[in-house]
Image (tube, coloured by chain):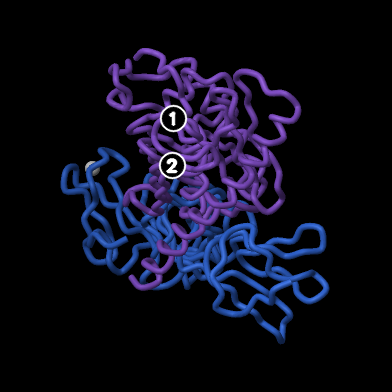
Amino acid sequence: MEKPEKLIVDGKRLDGRAPDELRPLKIEAGVLKRADGSAYVELGANKVLAAVYGPREMHPRHEQQPDIAVLRCRYAMAPFSVEERKRPGPDRRSVEISKVTREAIEPVLFLELYPRSVIDVFIEVLQADAGTRTAGINAAAVALADAGVPMRDLVSAVAVGKVDGTIVLDLTKEEDQWGTTDMPVAIVPRKKMITLLQMDGHFTGAEFKQALDLAFNACERIYEAQRQALRERYAIKQGG
Amino acid sequence: MVEVRTGDFVVPGDFLATTEEFVPGEGAYEEGGKIYASSTGVVLVDARMKRISVFSRVLGPPTLKRDDVVVGRVDEVRDQSANVYIGVLRGREDRELPLPNLGMIHISQTHTGYVKDLAKQFKPGDIVRARVLNARREPVQLTTAGDELGVIVAACSRCRALLEREGTKLRCPNCGNVEFRKLANDYRQGVL
Ligand SMILES: [Zn+2]
């Protein structure tokens, strides 16, 4: 794709959003029957599925930790998730995202309750349009709560960035590609604790603060959607 | 602070009460003098016991408690005890059991009567149904005393064919070998 002349016209982005506007968000808990917990997240054109298994005995045994459970995350993109068919299997990017996802979620889990065990989180990107790592974290947090894994809090995540000199929330693929800065952020909502912050590009001090405020505000709304998904799921389980 | 009441829906991280007022029960935890939810569900306030918990019908990981019935595989038979790998908790077959999943049946807990030779009660590879006596110890203490408890599937120790029940004995349909076990009354009826 050619670089558009402008990514923001009259204060509106190419998809019509205001700079501080989130794409349409949909979260559903408990979508998979065979997983211990699961969640589905749609954020704009992103479609992401998370499945949780465990805590259960860690295999192989030599990877067991004597006094805590191991959180194992695997982020993967389906071959059909991007325009040019992706070669299946883990690549460097998936390995890196799996790692930061684990680090973003680990602080809210009571891993000490399950020595020698493993909690598996599988994140499958079915359709990608920038922001899949944060969508994956949002899905994983809901899936863990759906699995009844004891947690200190949920985790909410979103990307912020700079496009045509403007700080924007929740970048699309074009904005990510042609913008100057992309910063995914994950927070623990109650404690306002950041568990993921990556920066690709550059912000001035003032821009950084503005971007972070934008991310925190958006995470509040994402958190509400996560709660709502769990509430709906709970009502169904309660009834059935 | 908004007062949390019985029946309120909460998710992990929701504030429930302070530790001056309450102690955290199931599905709740304490941090810095405050009690928060650690699971998704509805709040249960026990004013008498000063306990606040989260009651979750969204079942979490199964946990073994006294009197739970489990099904497992005998891994080793010693003079005084048999070791059992616990496979499932009855009623929670939907989900793998977290650790500890190693159980132990002491010779005195195999039968309601006196048992002299544990090797005539269990053999490695047997599938047993047992009741939990103590889940706080590791291995988990189990018993097979009672009609409905004991071996539910056993294989011939010579040729590994599944043994068939003949009164109080087991006979191998393949090689004719006769063996003994502490049998559950529904041996090989396909019920866990
Ligand atoms: Zn035989």
Foreground: B88 or A163? A163
Q: Earlier in the sequence, mark 1 or mark 2?
A: 2
Colour purple belongs to chain? A
Q: At 69% across and 29% down in the image, what residue appears?
A: A207
Which quarter of the picture shows residue A30? bottom left
Which quarter of the picture shows residue B185? bottom left
Amino acid type assigned to the residue bearing label 2 in the image:
Arg
The residue that label 1 is drawn on is: A172
Q: Dividing the image into four equal quarters, which quarter contains ligand 1?
A: top left
Does the Cβ of the disc 2 residue fall within 8 Å of ligand 1? no
From this viewpoint, which residue is outermost toward the front?
A10
Foreground: B30 or A162? A162
* CB within 8 Å, label 1 to label 2: yes
One can see residue B144 in this view:
no
Q: At 27% across and 67% down in the image, what residue appears?
A: B186
Q: At 43% across and 50% down in the image, what residue appears?
A: A37
Please state the horizontal and vertical placement of residue B112, each as a whole percent of the image: 47, 72
Foreground: A98 or A204? A204
Q: At 55% across and 33% down in the image, what residue appears?
A: A168
The residue that label 2 is drawn on is: A23
Amino acid type assigned to the residue bearing label 1 in the image:
Thr
- Say above or below: A66 vs A152: above
Colour blue belongs to chain? B
Please state the horizontal and vertical placement of residue B87, each as a whole percent of the image: 42, 51
Which quarter of the picture shows residue A190? bottom right
Left or right of A78 in this view: A223: right
- Say above or below: A174 vs B1: above
SS for callout 1: loop
Local packing at callout 2 (Cα closer than 10 Å; few below 14, some 14-19, many 20+) is some
Local packing at callout 1 (Cα closer than 10 Å; few below 14, some 14-19, many 20+) is many
SS for callout 2: loop
